[in-house]
Amino acid sequence: MTDDEEENAVRQLGELIGYGRTMQLCEQIWSAKGGINSGVAHSVGPCVAFMVPCPHPELDDNGHCDWCCGSGRVTDRVLKAMPWKVAA
């Protein structure tokens, strides 16, 4: 598959289910593969220092967390903004 073909395939999927959902599913699939990189698909480099586990307090009808969109992580500031007391 050429770069253009790959880009077009991702574009079609992003337009069909949404780009955020596409990225969420990619991270979920990558993390499910396990190994040394499990769970770090979206949080790498300097930004990972600002991430904390999400308690998944609110789920939509599909079981997706409204706060972290399924990534499993939020910033400490987002965690503190949740409308209840959650230990960081």
Image: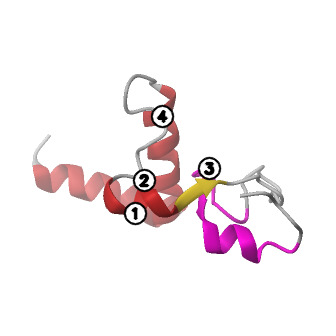
Disc 2, disc 1: CB below 8 Å?
yes
Q: In the visual, does 49 lie left or right of 59? A: left
Residue 15 appears left or right of 10: right
Figure check: 83 above or below 2: below
Q: Is residue 84 left or right of residue 62?
A: right
Q: Secondary structure at mark 4?
A: helix
Of callouts 3 and 2, the N-terminal one = 2
In the picture shown, does residue 17 fall above or below 82? above
Q: Residue at x 45, y 64 (%)?
A: 19
Label 3, label 1: how far apart the Cα atoms are: 14 Å
Please report contact status of discs 3 and 2: CB closer than 8 Å, yes or no. Answer: no
In this rendering, the count of numbered labels is 4
Marks 3 and 2, how far apart at CA: 10 Å
| Residue kind at label 1, given as amino acid type | Cys
Q: CA distance from mark 2 to mark 4?
A: 12 Å
Residue 29 image position (x, y, % from top left): 48, 35
At label 3, which amino acid type do we have? Gly
**Mark 1 neighbour density, 10 Å: few (under 14) some (14–19) many (20 or more):** few
**Residue on which disc 4 sits:** 31
What segment carries the magenta color?
66-83
**Dot 1 corresponds to which residue?**
47
Pick the quarter of the image with the N terminus.
Answer: top left
| Residue at 73% from the left image edge and 64% from the top image edge | 66
Q: Is residue 11 left or right of residue 32?
A: left
Circle 2 SS class: loop
Residue of label 2: 43
